[in-house]
Amino acid sequence: MSVAKIIEISSSSKTSFDDAVKQGIAEANKTVKNIEGAWVQDQKVAVTNGVVTEYRVMLKVTFVLE
């Protein structure tokens, strides 16, 4: 039997939502072992003078406890 835990993280990118997800997972992977998956709970953008300047995601990351 395995038990999984879900944590919530936020991540941002100047490039895209996809990049924000990849950066968030890469950073979480530095301290969290056994990441199995993630889902995007929320997406939003920062806007300055009518231009999108940052893409932000809220992720729920699932990992298996040892």
Image: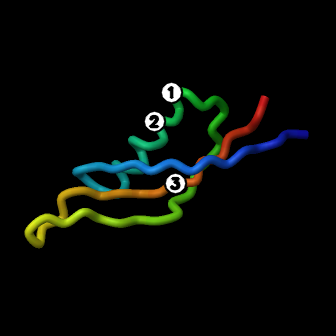
Q: Amino acid at mark 3?
A: Leu
State the colouring used for the structure image: rainbow
Rendered view: 33 above or below 48:
above
View extreme (left): residue: 49
User: N-terminal of the two: label 1 or label 3?
Assistant: 1
Q: Secondary structure at mark 2?
A: helix
Q: For the point 18% across and 64% down, which residue is it?
A: 52
- Using the numbered discs, state the Cα–Cα distance from disc 1 to disc 2 in whole angstroms: 7 Å
* Quadrant (top left, top right, bottom left, bottom right) of the C terminus: top right
* Residue 30: numbered disc: 1
* Quadrant (top left, top right, bottom left, bottom right) of the N terminus: top right
Q: Amino acid at mark 2?
A: Ala
> Quick one: 38 or 46, which is closer to the camera?
46
Circle 2 residue: 26
Q: For the point 40% across and 48% down, which residue is it?
A: 11
Q: Are marks 1 and 2 in contact (CB under 8 Å)?
A: yes
* Residue 15: numbered disc: none
Q: Amino acid at mark 1?
A: Lys
Circle 3 residue: 59
Q: For the point 39% across and 41% down, which residue is it?
A: 23
Q: Position of residue 57 (x, y in %)?
A: 41, 57
Count neighbours of disc 2 (C-alpha within 10 A) and say few if under 14, some if 14 to 19, many if 20 or more: few
